[in-house]
Amino acid sequence: MRIEIRIIESTEKERLGVGSVIDEMGNAVFTFCTLELPYKNNQRQISSIDLGKYRVRKRFSEKYGNHFELISVKNRDKILIHVANFVRELKGCIAVGSAHKDIDNDGTKDLINSRKTLNKLNAIMPYEFELIITH
């Protein structure tokens, strides 16, 4: 199993994507949406990460509960896939949800059903897997 995220919109405020869980036969078995900070040359705390391939593993913390960590991101650490509804909750990580929607009426798209989406990913993904981020 692997996850593929295709970036569908990049603005000065955020980066939006659509992710798919791909099984061993190449079939998409689950689809979700992503939210990240805008891309600012992979700078810590203020930018989304570079496009590319990453190893991901499951992780637990008191703050985020069960979530995922990207391993060996160039010049970065603790890049997580975790629950968040708003881009202001991110510092370089990837949030997941079921759809993009401007839920706080600030003119930017947010995520809905983030916890439910992350729980589903935790249930179906193995302990370690590949993530591919593309345009």
Image: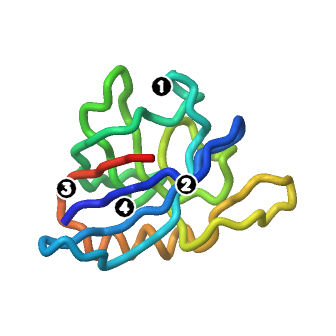
Residue displayed at 51% across by 22% down: 41
As rendered, which of 10 and 47 lies closer to the eye? 10
Tell us which disc is closer to us: 4 or 3.
Answer: 3
User: From the viewer's perspective, is 96 left or right of 129?
Assistant: right
| Image location of residue 73, percent across then percent down | 31, 31
State the CA–CA distance, disc 1 to disc 2.
Answer: 18 Å
Q: Which residue is mark 4?
A: 66
Q: Which residue is mark 3?
A: 129
Mark nearest the camera among 4 and 2 is 2
Residue 118 pos. (x, y %): 43, 67
Q: CA distance from mark 3 to mark 1?
A: 22 Å
**Whole-number angstrom distance, CA of label 4 to CA of label 3:** 15 Å
Mark 4 or mark 1, whichever is nearer to me:
1
Q: Amino acid at mark 3?
A: Phe
The image's mark for residue 8 is 2
Residue found 59% across the figure and 28% down from its top: 46
Q: Which residue is mark 1?
A: 42
Dot 1 falls on a residue whose secondary structure is loop
Q: From this viewpoint, which residue is outermost toward the front?
A: 135
The 10 Å Cα crowd at callout 1, few under 14, some 14 to 19, many 20 or more, is some
